[in-house]
Amino acid sequence: MLNFSDLLPYTDQFLKGLLTTVELTLYSTLLGLILGAVLAIARQYGSSLLASVVSVYVELIRNTPFIVQLFFIFFGLPSIGVMLSPWQAGMIAMVINLAAYSTEIIRAGLGTTPKGQWEAAKVLGLSFKQTLLRVVMVPAVEKIYPALTSQCIIVMLGSAVLSQISVPDLTYAANLVQSRNFRSFESYLITAGLYLLLAILMRKAFNMIGRRVFSYRVTK
């Protein structure tokens, strides 16, 4: 029989885990998207050497498990003298993972820009940077915005594996609670509900930001 009352003494544990997950998500989303945008531009418009380097990075991250990347950062880097806390290693892993996927998503948006827009901007005397920021980037991101939103949510959900290196996130809290009161079903049910709530709130937040950023489409 379900008994959620046994979880009440551990409310603080769940709230601390939830806060840690939210914090990691905010930092990794912001940094991952910025890095992804820079790498997408480098791969789309940079030299062949730079594009090749970015391509290797993207393929390496996209074709290896996230948990292996996490273990490499946390357990592997100390062997060459790079010591990181669980929180730092977890955030870096999330940033690197999101950046790789967002690089390809953003590059796909940049690739849809008509050549005529570049030519028109050149005629108007705009520099490459001005054309990219004022003419190309916003319409390109608008086209791939739903995919970018989904990828950010996927990375947030994937953060559950950070508990494997003792990051005190939401999953870590659930593991701790169920090990003390043996209410595994209730603990993980609550945890699943909180992850679902986070995913819904993230999508709503992205939609709200999108309406603001792409409001130039409104004609009335």
Image (tube, rainbow, N blue to C red):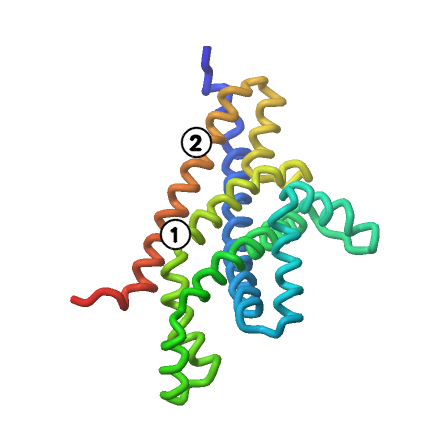
Residue sitting at x 68%, y 46%: 69
Give how far across and how far down residue 80 sits, in percent. 83, 55
Give the farthest residue toward the left.
220
Of the pair 193 and 66, the residue shown nearer to us:
66
Disc 1 to disc 2: CB gap under 8 Å:
no
The three-letter code of the residue at mark 1 reads Pro
- Label drawn at residue 76: none
Compared to residue 144, the image places residue 130 above or below, namely below
Q: Callout 1: helix, strand or loop?
A: helix
Instruction: Check disc 1 and report the residue beneath it.
Output: 146
Horizontal side of 172 relative to 201 (left or right) equals: right
The quarter of the picture where residue 39 lies is bottom right
- The x and y percentages for residue 181 are 58, 19
Name the residue tied to disc 2.
Answer: 193
Name the element at disc 2: helix
- Using the image, determine if residue 33 lies above or below residue 123: above
The amino acid type of the residue labelled 2 equals Gly
Of 8 and 144, the residue lying toward us:
144
**Mark 1 or mark 2: which is in front?**
1
Q: Position of residue 182 (x, y in %)?
A: 58, 17
Where residue 100 appears, as percent x and y from the top left, is 58, 55
